[in-house]
Image (spheres, rainbow, N blue to C red):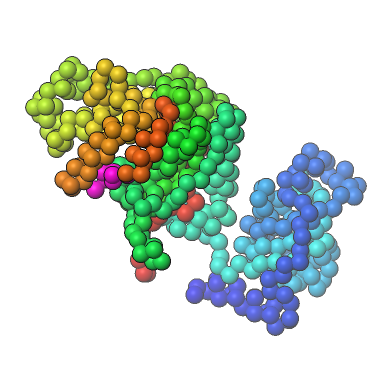
C-alpha cells in the first residue's frame, strides 16, 4: 500500500472512531450540475445574490483547493462539472473542520446550497451543507492523459470514466446508436427477437467457436458465432421481418478491429434481395451520422467520410483484377491465379475463390476509405448465400467497406434445401482437410428449409465498428467498456 492510500484509510478510521457513518445512504440529490448551469449560467453576481434558489447535488470531487477558512471543489456528476464553494461561515465551524479533515480528491460528497458567482466570475454553489458519502481509498491518477500504457485505461475502465469525460461521451453515443437502430427497424415493421447464445452446433458463420459443456445434459455446447440460422428459422415460421442486437463470440485473435466478444446487428427481410438491403443500409447509416455527428459527413482519423449515399459499388473479382493490373479473365486461370498469389506473398488455396478473396483482403480492402459495396462474392466463401443467376460460381452478396475495414455483410438468402445440404457437405469436407472455421452440418436447419423459407435478404452489421466510425475511435477497445485483455503480469 502506498503512502497516499494509507493516509486515506487513516481518515476513514478517524470517522469510525467518532461513530460517524462511513458509507451513508440517506442523501438524496434533487438536482444535477447541469440544472444549475441551465438556470443561472448567464445570471450576474448581483442577481444570484438575490436568488432564493437552492440546490441539492451529489458527485465526485475532481479538484480541491483549500485556503484556510475556505475551499473550492470541482464536483462532477453524470451531467458535468460545477464549482462548490465551502467555507467556515457557510458550513459552520464543526462541519468545516470535519470537511477539511476527511474530504479529498476522488471522494463522493453530497452538497446543498445556493448559487453564487465568485470574484473571478465562475458560477458556483455556496455550500451550507456538505457530507462525505463515499471515501475513495485510492488516489486518482494525476496525469491521466500522460499515461503511456493505454491498457491501464481498458483494464480499469472505471478510472477512465471517472477522469476522462470524453470516454463517457463515446458510450453515451453508443447507446444513442443502438436506440436509433432499434427505432429504424421497428418503424419498418421488423420484430426484435432473442435467439440462443449457446448452440449445439456453431453455425451461421465461418469462425472458430468457444466450447463449453452442459453438465446436467452431459452435452457439448458452443457460444454462438452468429444468430443467422436461428433467425432464418423464424422466417420459415412466418415472422417475415426479424432482427436481433446480439452478442457473438469467436475464438480469434485480438487487434484494433477484433474482440472475441462483440455486438452485432442481424436482420432478415422476406421477399427482399441484397440490392434492397443496400438501399436500406444507406438510409440507416445516413440517419445514424446525422443523429450522432449532426451531418452525413463524418470525421474519422483525419479523413472526411461521406455516409449520405449512394455508395460506390464494385465486384470482388473486378476490384482484385484492377489491383493486380490484369484482366478479370486472368483470375479464372488456376495456374495464373496461383502465380499472382505467390508474387504477392500469399500461399494459393486449392479453391480459386478463396485465393481471390485473400488477394482482395491484402490489396483492395485497406484502400476502400469511402463507403463501398463490394458485390458478387465467390461461392466458395459464401455457404449460405443464393447463387447468382447465370453465374453459379458467384453469389448475390455484398460487404460494405468504410475506412479500410468491413462494416456489414449481406446476401440474398439461399432457401433451396438441396443446395444448402450440398453446401454443408462441402463445409464438412473442408473441415476434414483441417479448416477449423468451416461450418458444421446443421441437419435441423435443412429440415426447416424443406418446410419452405420465403425468398429473403439478410444482413449483419458490426455495432462496435459502427461506433468506432461515428465516434472517431481508432481501436475497438475504445468503444467496448470491458475489452478482453491478457492477464496482468505480477509486478
Q: Is residue 180 above or below residue 436?
A: above
Say if residue 401 shows up in the picture: no
Residue 178 versus residue 415: which sits nearer the camera?
A: 415
Q: Say which quarter of the image contains residue 350.
A: top left
* Location of residue 368 in the rendering, given as x and y in whole percent from the top left corner: 35, 27
Count of numbered labels shown in the rendering? 0
Q: Splitting the image into 4 quarters, where does residue 450 fall?
A: top left
Name the foreground residue: 390 vs 65: 390
- Residue 276: image x %, image y %? 45, 22
Please, what is the dominant secondary structure of the magenta stretch?
loop
Residue 427 in view here: yes
Q: Residue at x 80, y 42 (%)?
A: 39
Please state which of residues 285 and 222 is positioned toward the viewer in this rendering.
Answer: 222
- Which span is picked out in magenta? 436-442
Looking at the image, which residue sits at the far front?
A: 451
Q: Position of residue 385 (x, y in %)?
A: 33, 30
Q: Is residue 441 magenta?
A: yes
In the displayed structure, 323 sits above or below 233; it is above
Q: Residue at x 64, y 75 (%)?
A: 11
Q: Identify the residue at image location x=25%, y=28%.
A: 378
**Is residue 59 depicted above or below 79 in this figure?**
below
83 sits left or right of 295 in the view: right
> Whole-percent x and y of residue 48?
85, 46
Name the residue: 84% across, 68% down: 92
Quarter of the picture containing the C terminus is: bottom left
Amino acid at each position: 500500500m502506498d503512502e497516499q492510500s494509507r493516509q486515506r484509510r487513516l481518515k476513514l478510521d478517524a470517522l469510525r472512531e467518532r461513530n460517524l457513518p462511513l458509507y451513508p445512504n440517506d442523501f438524496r440529490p434533487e438536482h444535477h450540475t447541469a440544472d444549475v448551469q441551465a438556470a443561472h449560467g448567464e445570471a450576474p453576481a448581483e442577481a444570484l445574490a438575490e436568488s432564493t434558489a437552492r440546490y441539492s447535488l451529489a458527485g465526485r470531487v475532481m479538484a480541491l483547493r483549500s485556503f484556510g477558512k475556505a475551499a473550492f471543489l470541482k464536483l462532477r456528476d453524470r451531467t458535468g462539472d460545477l464549482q462548490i464553494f465551502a467555507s467556515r461561515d457557510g458550513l459552520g465551524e464543526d462541519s468545516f473542520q470535519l470537511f477539511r479533515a476527511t474530504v479529498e480528491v476522488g471522494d463522493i460528497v453530497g452538497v446543498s446550497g445556493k448559487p453564487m458567482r465568485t470574484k473571478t466570475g465562475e458560477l458556483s454553489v455556496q455550500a451550507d451543507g456538505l457530507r462525505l458519502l463515499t471515501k475513495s481509498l485510492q488516489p486518482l491518477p494525476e496525469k491521466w492523459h500522460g499515461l503511456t500504457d493505454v491498457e491501464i485505461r481498458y483494464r480499469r475502465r472505471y478510472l477512465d470514466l471517472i477522469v476522462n469525460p470524453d470516454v463517457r461521451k463515446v458510450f453515451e453515443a453508443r447507446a444513442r446508436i443502438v436506440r436509433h437502430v432499434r427505432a429504424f427497424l421497428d418503424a419498418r415493421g421488423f420484430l426484435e427477437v432473442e435467439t440462443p447464445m449457446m448452440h449445439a452446433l456453431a453455425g451461421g458463420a465461418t469462425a472458430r467457436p468457444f466450447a463449453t459443456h452442459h453438465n446436467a445434459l452431459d452435452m457439448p455446447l458452443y457460444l454462438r458465432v452468429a444468430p443467422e440460422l436461428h433467425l432464418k428459422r423464424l422466417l420459415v415460421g412466418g415472422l417475415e421481418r426479424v432482427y436481433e442486437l446480439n452478442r457473438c463470440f469467436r475464438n480469434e485473435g485480438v487487434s484494433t478491429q477484433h474482440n472475441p466478444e462483440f455486438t452485432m446487428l442481424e436482420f432478415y427481410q422476406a421477399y427482399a434481395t441484397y440490392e434492397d438491403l443496400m438501399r436500406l443500409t444507406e438510409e440507416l447509416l445516413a440517419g445514424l451520422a446525422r443523429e450522432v455527428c449532426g451531418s452525413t459527413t463524418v470525421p474519422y482519423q483525419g479523413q472526411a467520410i461521406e455516409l449520405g449515399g449512394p455508395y460506390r459499388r464494385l465486384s470482388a473479382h473486378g476490384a482484385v483484377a484492377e489491383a493486380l493490373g490484369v484482366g478479370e479473365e486472368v483470375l479464372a486461370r488456376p495456374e495464373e491465379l496461383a502465380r499472382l498469389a505467390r508474387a504477392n506473398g500469399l500461399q494459393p488455396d486449392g479453391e480459386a475463390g478463396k485465393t481471390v478473396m485473400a488477394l482482395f483482403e491484402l490489396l483492395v480492402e485497406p484502400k476502400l476509405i469511402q463507403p463501398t459495396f463490394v458485390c458478387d462474392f465467390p461461392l466458395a466463401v459464401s455457404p449460405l448465400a443464393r447463387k447468382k443467376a447465370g453465374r453459379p460460381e458467384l453469389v448475390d452478396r455484398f460487404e460494405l467497406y468504410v475506412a479500410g475495414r468491413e462494416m456489414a455483410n449481406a446476401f440474398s438468402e439461399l432457401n433451396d434445401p438441396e443446395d444448402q445440404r450440398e453446401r454443408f457437405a462441402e463445409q464438412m469436407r473442408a473441415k476434414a482437410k483441417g479448416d477449423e472455421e468451416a461450418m458444421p452440418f446443421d441437419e435441423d436447419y435443412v429440415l426447416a428449409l424443406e418446410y419452405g423459407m420465403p425468398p429473403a435478404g439478410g444482413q449483419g452489421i458490426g455495432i462496435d465498428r459502427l461506433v468506432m466510425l461515428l465516434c472517431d475511435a481508432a481501436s475497438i477497445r475504445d468503444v467496448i467498456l470491458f475489452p478482453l485483455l491478457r492477464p496482468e503480469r505480477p509486478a
